[in-house]
Amino acid sequence: MISPLASSQGAISLGRVVRLAAFTSLAAAALGAFFERALPAQQGGAGPAVYRVPVTGVIELGLAPFIERSLEEAEAAGAAAVILDIDTPGGRVDAAERIADAVSDSPVPVYAFVNRRALSAGALISLATHGIYMRPGSVIGAATPVDGAGQRAPEKIVSAMRSTMRALAEARGLDPTVAEAMVDEQIAVPGLSEPGQLLTLTTEEAVGVGYANEVEDWDGLMGALGIATPQVVDQTVNWAENVVRFLSHPIVSPFLLTLGFLGLLIELRTPGLGLAGAAGVLSLILFFGSNLIVGLAGLEGILIFAVGVALVLVEVFLIPGIGVFGIAGALAVLVGVYMSLLGGLPTMPDFTRAGGVLTTSLTLVLLTSWFMLRKLPSNRRLTNLGIFLGEDTSKEIGYTSAVRRKDLVGAEGVALTDLRPAGTGLFGEERVDVVSDSEWIAHGTPIRIVSSEGYRQVVRPIAAKPIGSGEEKKDDSGDKAK
């Protein structure tokens, strides 16, 4: 038989083992990330180090920290150059602008190697480098900004993007009109594009206007840069950056926000604390945490969102009804979400960038909420708000409607007052408020309850024939009823 003390010691030992295992796992992951950053993959060569940084797939905010880290490591290692290996259809303009700023500020020369395509945000990043080199059959351009629905952004945003591209081209001594034509289809470039046609350059066209140099492959690029037998350091995204890039992806981010709102809604709709609430909180933590890591969300945005949630909870649990707390809380939640998507207080041009994420999330929330509010069991606190009405009309939740007295149907008694048409009847020892079915009934007349309709107990004189019998109704004196 095991004593309670031994059992307690065993539990303590097991707890220590679990904590030690968890700490060891976290330490191993941290060391792995450290060595992955400190010891990047290298390829032979005895010459100066060249850092090759892939810029592939959709450009999202999670890519910016990876580029910044790579540039910092290249600077610390005294690298001869950093090569951005670009093959992207584009992505978020704010992410591209952040990467372009990091490239422009880097003391290490940065070059763009367009390995198939550098479209939209990829074109902006390429123009920020010290030089563009393109493989045969590659393209660059088509940099007009679009909104969340894929439509051309408002002129204010297009104008800002056009000016940014023009400034980058001027800084490199290139024809700024070509850069502007990549953004605005109304700008024509003789021999390359007509008015109404957005400019996208092939390798030959880019070389022809002096925007790029043509190279066959990586070795050709090294030869063009004059770097012999380089030591190539291939930068790779570590596990943490992979997670952040996934969570901040333009498709994943709206779903995290949607799951967060739906989880909290389900938790409020159903009694008790369950899995839905935990999943909602976790989704919101991942949404805000990923934006915080990439440097977009600030603590002020998260704080405003938390205050908004707190105000909504006060409205639900402490002050039922639609009032100041609920409206202020909803506004604070929206402002907090926008600030986490935009990196600051929302302005009119910024609504286009964040509108796609928030519109998608709200649409999914509204459609799913409609279904859940009809199918899920109700929570009394939400019913008390007056928003979600249930079928229960008991006095415990504020209703005072009478219970139907079906037991009185068929009971016979006497009218204590004249029923004109309402009055009082006596049935056994119980006084009941009654109403005549059709005619005035004098007090003292024998009556029978024929139906119970909440407060209304409908009566007829006992001498009356049933309606539809084909006979005239008579009262107790035998006179015809009018």
Image (spheres, grey):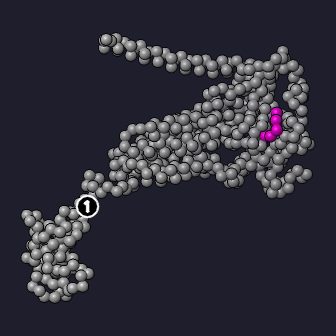
Q: Quick check: 158 left or right of 354?
A: right
Task: Place residue 110 in its image quadrant.
Answer: top right
* Number of marks drawn: 1
- Specify the principal SS of the magenta part: strand
Q: Residue at x 11, y 67 (%)?
A: 427
* Mark 1 neighbour density, 10 Å: few (under 14) some (14–19) many (20 or more): few
Q: Is residue 450 above or below residue 359?
A: below
User: What residue range appears in magenta?
Assistant: 113-118
Q: Is residue 419 magenta?
A: no
Residue 424, position as x, y percentages in the image? 13, 71
Q: Secondary structure at mark 1?
A: loop
Task: Place residue 237 in its image quadrant.
Answer: top right
Q: Is residue 381 visible?
A: yes
**Location of mark 1 (residue):** 401
Residue 379, position as x, y percentages in the image? 36, 47
Q: Residue at x 31, y 11 (%)?
A: 1
Compare residues 391 and 148 and report the one nearer the observer. Answer: 391
Q: Amino acid at mark 1?
A: Ser
Quarter containing the C terminus: bottom left
Q: Residue at x 80, y 52 (%)?
A: 198
Compare residues 395 and 311 and report the one nearer the observer. Answer: 395
Compare residues 364 and 415 and report the one nearer the observer. Answer: 415
Residue 225, position as x, y percentages in the image? 87, 27
